[in-house]
Amino acid sequence: MKYKIGDKVRIKTWKGMEKEYGLNHLGSIQNHYNTCRFTRYMESLLNANCPDRILEIRKINGSESCYYMKNIPCKKDIPCNWSDDMIEEKIIPEPIYSRFDILDIRNK
């Protein structure tokens, strides 16, 4: 597993994953680990709640190689877990500068 709790990541697009991995018999995208599927339901939740496709990892299930994300309102009977294969990149936050850093007027 490449990421840890609290990391913000960008999820790949449906078209990109479909081209890379193909669809299974249910019409979902199956990852290489065969433990997580990217479903059309997950895509609709992502589009409705996070149009920038950036999610924050809330929990890791190491035995299944899956992540659970914050701010995605999944139904209890429909799993919404994400794998390394579904993640495009980790988002590195911009540094926050104080006014002293910007103006460079601190005593040295």
Image (cartoon, helix red, strand yellow):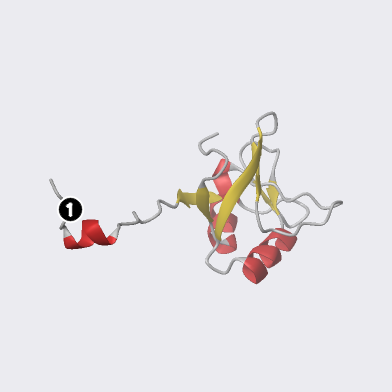
Q: Kindly give the residue lying farthest to the right in the view shown.
A: 77
Q: Nearer the viewer, residue 95 or 23?
A: 95
Q: Is residue 62 left or right of residue 54?
A: right
- Identify the residue at the far top of this view: 63
Front residue of this view, candidates 96 and 98: 98
Q: Quadrant of residue 43?
A: bottom right
Q: Which residue is mark 1?
A: 106
In the displayed image of the protein, which residue is found farthest to the left? Answer: 108
For the point 70% across and 48% down, which residue is it? 37
Q: Secondary structure at mark 1?
A: loop
The crowding category of the residue bearing disc 1, from other C-alpha atoms within 10 Å (few below 14, some 14 to 19, many at least 20), is few
The quadrant in which the N terminus is found is top right
Residue 3: percent from the left, percent from the top? 52, 39
The residue lying at 65 percent from left, 30 percent from top is: 62
Q: Is residue 48 above or below residue 28?
A: below
Q: Quadrant of residue 46?
A: bottom right
- Residue 14 pos. (x, y %): 59, 61
Point out residue 54 in the picture as x, y percentages from the top left corner: 53, 59
User: In the rendered view of the protein, which quadrant contains the C terminus?
Assistant: top left
Q: How many marks?
A: 1
User: Please, is residue 30 above or below residue 61 in the view?
Assistant: below
- Identify the residue at image location x=77%, y=57%: 74
Relative vertical location of residue 65 with respect to residue 9 in this rendering, above or below: above
Q: Amino acid at mark 1?
A: Arg
Residue furthest to the front? 107
Q: Position of residue 92 (x, y in %)?
A: 40, 51
